[in-house]
């Protein structure tokens, strides 16, 4: 066989193989496009169901905000609670700010963005999360959302809000940064949101007013291997809310998010004491020393962090967690 004939045969095999690969790529693209269409339709169905549930709770006087809970994009029932609150107060600026959103697939404000056409700012300390959000055209192109990669501290939070043009009379602020939540809210002085949602750590008890000590570099999963040493108690957040002019109107059934309404707008809600509002967490978060999920009891979780420091936010004294009395 001559060299030219050999090369021609090899080229034929190469072209055949190349065309076969192109056909496979085209088929994969069609599958991915079909998958994207299906996901979009599922998303639209989720939104439609959320709208139906929202209309069911509109202008009703429920015995508890928990009766309004439903989930579209929130982790638990926060979407429903927010919709219920919005049906009972006026909002001048339909703008939100949410801290600690991860990739924004589960969040307290996504339903506001997509269903109610609010605009907003979301912040997260993980650059990959923010890049994911910016590449999600269903929220970042289709809606008025801004996402910023930044590690929030009590020294930079006000400048972040001001630089992003956040109005003083903000519609909703959601704080969930798994650590310095109390200290960040305490530091905020440039806005006066109508609604504030903040995560609390139910392991800290129903009556104590404590938080983890402030640290600029606090990261939950490295602060302690257990993953349950973070944030503040409900009592600490309610103590801060009162100082800032807010009323506690409840917590979600899952036992991790507290809802506050500005005092001048709280007349349509039953204001609760910490004892009335408190709910213990109904989910597991603890990990073992190797980073694996564990299934230990609440008492066992509390034992893991017994010797760690907490700050009484009223007296500003430090204690060991095991010395708290709830």
Image (cartoon, helix red, strand yellow):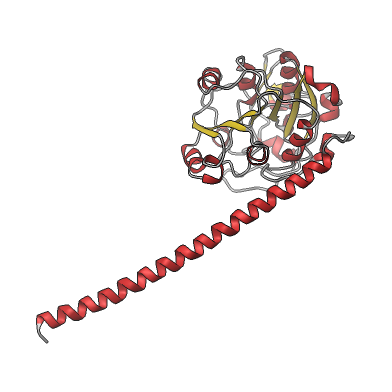
In this view, 187 is above or below 8: above
In this view, 280 is above or below 182: below
Q: Nearer the viewer, residue 152 or 167?
A: 167
Apparent side of residue 167 relative to residue 66 in the rendered image (left or right):
left
Give the residue at x 80% y 42%.
55
Q: Position of residue 174 (x, y in %)?
A: 65, 30
Q: Nearer the viewer, residue 29 or 325?
A: 29
Q: Residue furthest left?
A: 2
Where is residue 69, by image quadrant?
A: top right
Where is residue 120, by image quadrant?
A: top right
Quadrant housing the N terminus: bottom left
Quadrant housing the C terminus: top right
- Numbered marks: total: 0
* Residue 243 in view in this figure: yes
Give the residue at x 62% y 48%.
293
Q: Nearer the viewer, residue 238 or 143?
A: 143
Give the residue at x 68% y 22%.
193
């Amino acid at each position: 066989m001559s060299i030219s004939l050999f090369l021609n045969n090899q080229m034929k095999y190469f072209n055949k193989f190349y065309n076969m690969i192109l056909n496979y790529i085209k088929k994969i693209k069609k599958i991915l496009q079909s998958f994207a269409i299906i996901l979009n339709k599922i998303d639209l169905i989720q939104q439609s169901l959320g709208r139906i549930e929202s209309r069911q709770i509109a202008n009703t006087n429920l015995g508890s905000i928990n009766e309004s809970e439903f989930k579209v994009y929130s982790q638990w029932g926060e979407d429903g609670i927010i919709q219920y609150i919005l049906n009972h107060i006026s909002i001048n600026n339909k703008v939100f700010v949410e801290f600690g959103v991860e990739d924004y697939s589960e969040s307290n404000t996504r339903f506001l963005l997509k269903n109610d056409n609010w605009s907003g700012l979301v912040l997260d300390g993980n650059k990959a999360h923010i890049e994911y959000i910016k590449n999600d055209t269903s929220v970042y192109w289709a809606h008025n959302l801004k996402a910023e990669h930044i590690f929030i501290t009590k020294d930079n939070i006000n400048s972040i809000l001001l630089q992003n043009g956040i109005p003083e009379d903000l519609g909703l602020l959601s704080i969930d940064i798994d650590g310095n939540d109390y200290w960040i809210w305490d530091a905020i002085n440039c806005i006066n949101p109508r609604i504030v949602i903040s995560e609390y750590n139910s392991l800290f008890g129903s009556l104590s007013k404590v938080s983890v000590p402030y640290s600029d570099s606090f990261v939950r999963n490295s602060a302690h291997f257990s993953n349950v040493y973070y944030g503040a108690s409900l009592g600490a957040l309610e103590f801060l809310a009162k100082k800032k002019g807010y009323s506690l109107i409840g917590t979600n059934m899952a036992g991790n998010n507290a809802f506050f309404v500005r005092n001048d707008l709280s007349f349509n809600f039953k204001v609760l004491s910490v004892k009335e509002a408190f709910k213990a967490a109904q989910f597991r978060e603890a990990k073992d020393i190797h980073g694996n999920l564990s299934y230990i009891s609440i008492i066992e979780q509390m034992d893991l962090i017994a010797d760690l420091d907490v700050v009484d936010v009223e007296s500003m004294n430090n204690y060991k967690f095991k010395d708290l009395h709830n």
